[in-house]
Image: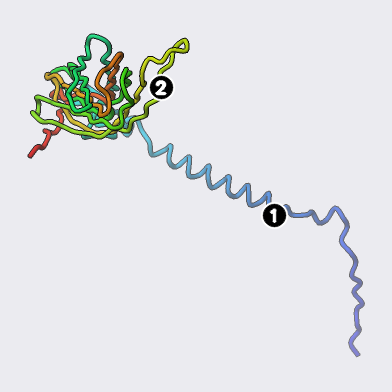
Amino acid sequence: MRQIQQITLRDPLPWQLAPIDLLRARRLSLLGSLLGVLAFTCARVSAADTVRVTNPATEPVLTSRVDEPARVPYQAQLVGATVTCDGGGFGTISCSGSISGAPAGKRLVVQQVSGKLIANSSSPTNAQIVLETQSPAAVYFAVPSISSVAFVFAGVFHGYASVFQSQQTVYIDGGSPVLITITLLGSTSVLNDSITVTGYVVDCTATAPCMPIVTH
């Protein structure tokens, strides 16, 4: 008969088994991978691989606006003697003034014409704005929004203050003046006037030429 040996199982002692931190192990593994990739990348980069960007005046780096490489804000205001007003009959009056525009080698882009006229007769009910250019030779029209209120100073009525504004886009090559005319319907005389032109100027030099203005 074979002899049966008895085996007794017992629990392991606390110092024989240690808990495993799975989250920490994953973090260490990820950190090791990143350090390996970084070391490999740094080993392959040399001084010859460095990218250098030059920006000489003869060949400047292209900007985000290739067609308009250099915008400069533009604003001109005509007041007092720079504005001439004449009654046009049939209850209208026209006020006009001229701006020098942009210098040669640049292009003026008009975006807005606004202003204020104080009429000493009735309140204007409508208006028109006309821009006349020489380069290219053309006439541009716009119908502005207009708001009129009674102008009272020291308890005395001095007329109607009319504020007008027109959003428009007109391209004008540099070197030529621009004539601006505002015509009011419903007034026959003006006491005070102001016309403001805003937009921007584009550089059209040889290093960044402007595309020609297409006209028909």
Please, what is the three-letter code of the amino acid marked with disc 1? Answer: Leu
Please, what is the three-letter code of the amino acid marked with disc 2? Answer: Ala
Q: Earlier in the sequence, mark 1 or mark 2?
A: 1
Give the structural element (helix, strand or loop) at label 1.
helix
Q: Determine which quarter of the picture holds residue 116.
A: top left
* The label number, if any, that marks residue 206 in the structure image: none
Disc 1 or disc 2, which is closer to the eye?
2
Q: Position of residue 4 (x, y in %)?
A: 91, 82
Q: Position of residue 189 (x, y in %)?
A: 25, 18
At a point 33% along the width and 30% down the height, the residue shown is 146
Q: How is the image coloured?
A: rainbow
Q: Tell me if label 1 and label 2 are in contact, CB under 8 Å.
A: no
Alpha-carbon distance for marks 1 and 2?
81 Å
Q: Quadrant of the C terminus?
A: top left
Q: Determine which quarter of the picture holds residue 132.
A: top left
Foreground of the two, 109 or 44: 109
At a point 19% along the width and 33% down the height, the residue shown is 141
Residue occupied by mark 1: 22
Q: Determine which quarter of the picture holds residue 172.
A: top left
**Residue 19, placed above or below residue 105:** below
Give the structural element (helix, strand or loop) at label 2.
strand
The extreme bottom residue here reads 1
* The label number, if any, that marks residue 150 in the structure image: 2
Foreground of the two, 33 or 61: 61
At a point 34% along the width and 24% down the height, the residue shown is 162
Mark 2 surroundings: few (<14), some (14-19) or many (≥20) residues within 10 A:
some
Q: Position of residue 183 (x, y in %)?
A: 22, 26
Foreground of the two, 141 or 60: 141
**Residue 155, placed above or below residue 27:** above
**In this figure, what is the number of numbered marks?**
2
Q: Quadrant of the N terminus?
A: bottom right
Q: Position of residue 148 (x, y in %)?
A: 37, 26
